[in-house]
Image (cartoon, rainbow, N blue to C red):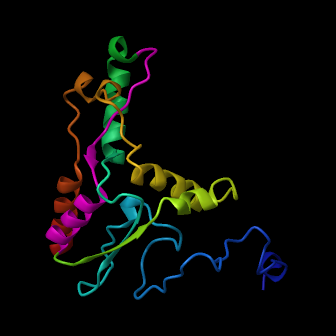
Amino acid sequence: MSFRSSHRNPNPPHAIKPRASHPTRVNRWPRNEPSRTPRPTQALNASTPASMEYPLHILGDADAQVDFTHIDDLATFLVATVQHPAISANRTLNFVSDRISYNEIAALLERFSGRTVEKTVWPLEVMHRVKGKSVFPDEFWILVRGMQGAGRFVRPPGEVHNALFPGVEVRTFERYSGEMFERERK
């Protein structure tokens, strides 16, 4: 046994522990994601058996439109801003890959995967109960998801700058889902 492991506290005071006031779900299959609140990109898990459902946790209104940006699209956008400093210098620019609701995401998952999506919708009050109580990332993601569920996670048209760089092709959720499940079938 190494020095490090022999002297490690198995229950450090900063560890994330379940609270009695929060529902606990038991994973029905092994997943390649942390046991924290899943981010939207973690909802598409290729290791999930075909007979199982996809869990989708939604905070607030499942029909609220939300802005999402695919990491590859953001990287391409950043390169375009550097290549065109006359357009981007000293400006705050925003880029959006897709504006979509969680209900629409669930429908795309079902369409492309052939599996059902198990939606769990939480009231916005959950966001207010955890706000400011911890420095752990879970609370941050709950706040972000709460803003999404309240319909406050979209930028007004004047604050989206996709049109400044028309060569940057976006990857919508529909395109992403189609590509991901096409790879899974191969």
- Residue 37: where, in percent of width, then height? 50, 67
Q: Position of residue 43 (x, y in %)?
A: 35, 67
Nearest to the observer: residue 26 or residue 185:
26
Residue at the spot x=43%, y=18% of the render? 91
Q: Is residue 44 left or right of residue 180?
A: right
The answer, for residue 186, to whether it is visible in the render is no
Numbered label tally: 0
- Identified at 62% across, 60% down, the residue is 130
- Work out whether residue 110 can be spotted: yes
- As drawn, 78 above or below 176: above
Instruction: Please tell me whether residue 115 belongs to the stretch shown in magenta.
Output: no
Q: Quadrant of the C terminus?
A: bottom left
Q: Is residue 94 above or below residue 103?
A: above
- Which residue occupies the foreground of this view, 168 or 21? 21
Residue at figure coordinates x 42%, y 15% from the top left: 89
Location of residue 138 with respect to 172 vertically, above or below: below
Residue plotted at (28% across, 54% down): 101
Residue 136 image position (x, y, % from top left)? 65, 59
Residue interval drawn in magenta: 89-113
